[in-house]
Amino acid sequence: MFKANYVRRHALEKSKSVKETQKTLNHSFFQKHLKKVYPIGLQKSTSSLSLSSLSLSLSQNSNDSSSQADSLTPLDEKISLALRLISPRERREPTTTVAKTVQQRRQPTPPSSTEPEELKRCNWITKSSDKAYIEFHDECWGVPAYDDNKLFELLAMSGLLMDYNWTEILKRKETLREVFAGFDPNTVAKMEEKEIMEVASNKALSLAESRIMCIVHNAKCIVKVVGECGSFSSYIWGYVNHKPVINRYKHPGNVPLRSPKAEALSKDLVKRGFRFVGPVIVHSFMQAAGLTIDHLVDCYRHSECVSLAERPWRHI
């Protein structure tokens, strides 16, 4: 029995020695391989080592790991592979794609090769029309005029249509303003025979003496209207209820040469002593002064003049 106990105790001691030896080998093996993938070593701590810290250290020391690749055992390779699989991957866009996108965004938009379309005007304005006539159409014709001097100027120029067309009259506009003192009715009404003769002798105007005397006579009539109505503007605009007449003609043939309102105004002007103020002349005056808007609907000036006409009444 003593012999049996001795054999049993000897076996237990041998088994314990084998376990301690295996434990020592495993610890040294783990430390050896862990230092290869985590060279900075492990420190004793109450907190466990996170996988993110392991993967971060692995990425920072990738060069050191690659230099030892030749000496790795199969077990080393498995550990290294396992750590790479659990390490987070950085999401990076290809440099060439990003650079190309940024370059495309920075490129300026190429200017349009098409030129702006030519403005659509009334049909009686053609490519052969004189510049002065085109400017008159674009800047004056159909624009409501409320100033007494401006209305007198347009009435005087409309009266000259008996001898000239609009282009010929407009070329004389600056000279007319000069000789008639900016069409101030009070000044023109005081012109004497000597001054009238000087204007008649002006070759740049080529106006007959009778036409000049007519303008001076009408100035005197305007002074009387101002004394009665307060202003020539108030008298004129009263015939359209102080608001422009807006027409919407599509074809030049639809635009009339006279209108009922023009006939009524012409009749009263003649009654007050004005000269060369027939219905056709008065209607031309009303078109030029914006009392009636006769631009064709497809003319770009039609909508602009309508916008001016729809403003609150602001006559002087």
Image (tube, rainbow, N blue to C red):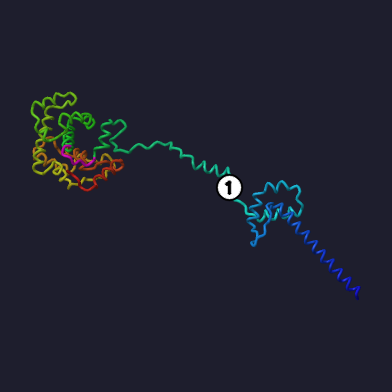
Q: Nearer the viewer, residue 116 or 14?
A: 14
Residue 131 picture quarter: top left
Q: Residue at x 59, y 50 (%)?
A: 91
Residue located beneath label 1 in the image: 93
Which quadrant would residue 173 be assigned to in this image? top left
Residue 59 among those drawn in magenta? no
Q: Quadrant of residue 297?
A: top left
> Where, quadrant-wise, is the C terminus in this rendering?
top left
Residue drawn at point x = 17 percent, y = 29 percent:
178
Magenta span:
142-149
Point out residue 240 in the picture as x, y percentages from the top left corner: 17, 46
Q: Amino acid at mark 1?
A: Glu
Of residues 64 and 114, the one nearer the viewer is 64
**Where 144 sits versus 197, above or below?**
below
Residue 97 shows in this picture: yes
Query: Is 147 covered by the magenta stretch?
Result: yes
Answer with left or right where residue 171 lies relative to residue 100.
left
Q: Is residue 129 shown left or right of residue 112?
A: left
